[in-house]
Amino acid sequence: MENATLLLFIPTFFAVSVTPGLCMSLAMTLGMTIGVRRTLWMMLGELVGVTIVSGAALIGVSALLLSKPALFEMFKYVGGAYILYLGVQMWLSKGKMAINLDDQNQQRVTNKALIIQGFVTAIANPKGWAFMVSLLPPFIVAGADLLPQATLLISIILCLEFMCLLIYAYGGRTLRKLLMRNNNVVLMNRIAGSMMMLVGVWLAVG
């Protein structure tokens, strides 16, 4: 693969990753409520999902899946309903992710649940599939071995995605610090809950 191709590929997919969307909104919300370190578990699930989506786009599985949307619909509605439920709980200052109003020692959501949440959001994200299907295959050099090219491109995508997820998660943490200075825990829960509900609705109807 030529250097000129990579120099075009990197800014193209950085722009795709950094654009506000389902996964980035989720990273900001979790960074605000459970912190950047715990949000890394969600990022792990999301990156696994991105790997599957990008790999499927390269080998043509995506065309088959997009022609039979029943599987997408299941992921979208189940995943969207779950995230919407979490958002409502956070808005009410309840649930595992909400900041506790009494002593700030919130009950922790499990790492497994965070991984699943990130994975489902990535897999069921129509925007992610659309970008991968339309943008990724054109960067493959015809006639050359697919595996090393796919490995390189997907590795770059994962690095860019992880970088952008961290940016959004740290943005949520910064917002949390600003709100905590005024001890405005209810407002913080409602902002985070509203963002989570938006992600859930977006995922279900997108």
Image (cartoon, rainbow, N blue to C red):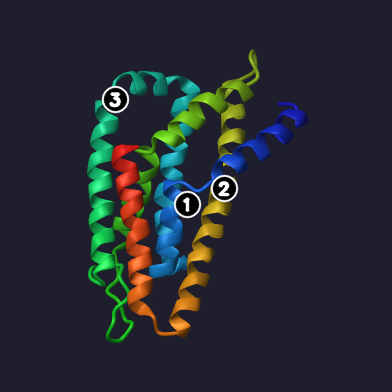
The label number, if any, that marks residue 24 in the structure image? 1
Classify 10 Å Cα crowding around label 1: few (below 14), some (14-19), many (20 and above): many
Residue position for label 3 = 69
Q: Which percent across, then down, holds residue 99?
A: 32, 75
Q: CA distance from mark 3 to mark 2?
A: 27 Å
Q: Amino acid at mark 1?
A: Met
Q: Earlier in the sequence, mark 3 or mark 2?
A: 2
Q: Name the residue carrying label 2.
A: 18
C-alpha gap between disc 1 and disc 3: 24 Å
Give the amino acid at mark 2.
Val
Q: Amino acid at mark 3?
A: Pro
**How far apart in space, not on screen, are marks 1 and 2 (Cα)?**
8 Å
Whether residues under marks 3 and 2 lie with C-beta atoms below 8 angstroms apart, the answer is no
**Marks 1 and 2 close (CB-CB < 8 Å):** yes
- Camera sees residue 90: yes
Quarter-of-image position of residue 33: bottom left
